[in-house]
Image (cartoon, rainbow, N blue to C red):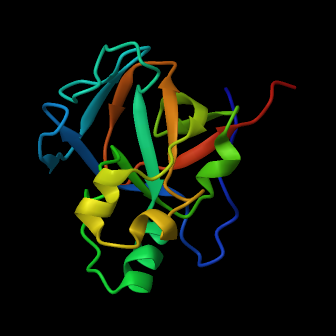
Amino acid sequence: MTKHSPAEAPANGEHPRVVHIHVADKHRGAMREIPAARLVAGRGIEGDRYFGTGKGQDISLVQEEHLRAACLSIGAPYLPGASRRNLTVRGCDLNRFLGREFLVGTVRLLGRELCEPCAWMEWNIGKGSLQALLQRAGILAQVLESGLIRPGDSISIPDPPS
């Protein structure tokens, strides 16, 4: 049996987890929240605009704490999905996942690259959000193993084999 370590030591007693899942049907389409998502290895989230595109954009993740802080700093309301990222997570430093495998529930992912803020964020979140989210706008990850994820699923880093 493989052991897993939490992605971070919880400072607030809360373990790292998924809080929202969003997809868009097309490139500039509206993001919609879904109760569960099927992730397919090497393809992404079924029903999302980037599914199967082969652009290395299997799935995008962002930290809720960073989004809330950015919204507070520019005086904008926090609206889940406004970042246009697929997964909003809480309780872990996503930048530490770059180049590492990690688990969302039972689905294995690989952190590939920073997902820097873009004009869409500035438009959706508010003026100043692009600057407020530099180096904190999330990551892109590759789906290594297929599976189903839901809000509430834990985020962990597999322990190396002994």
Q: Quadrant of the N terminus?
A: top right
Image coordinates for residue 140, horizontal then vertical, percent: 50, 36
- Residue 20, quarter of picture: bottom left
1 relative to 84 in the view: left or right: right
Looking at this view, name the residue that lies furthest to the right: 162
What is the quadrant of residue 25 in the picture? top left
Quadrant of image for the C terminus: top right
Compared across the picture, whether 68 is left or right of 157 comes to left
Q: Is residue 25 above or below residue 129?
A: above
Looking at the picture, tell me which residue is in the foreground, 96 or 115: 115
Q: Quadrant of residue 109?
A: top right
Q: Is residue 12 left or right of residue 132?
A: right
How many numbered badges does the structure rendering display?
0
Task: Give whichever of 16, 32 is nearer the camera.
Answer: 32
Q: Position of residue 63 (x, y in %)?
A: 48, 60
Of 118 and 82, the residue lying toward us: 118
Q: Residue at x 29, y 81 (%)?
A: 76
Above or below residue 65? Residue 33 is: above
Residue drawn at point x = 12 percent, y = 46 percent: 30
Expressed as whole percent of the image width and height from the top left, the position of residue 138 reads 50, 50
**Residue at image point 33% right, 87% down:** 75
- In the rendered view, tell whether residue 150 sits above or below residue 88: above
Residue ID at (33%, 57%): 121
Residue 155 can be seen, yes or no: yes
Is residue 6 in view?
Answer: no
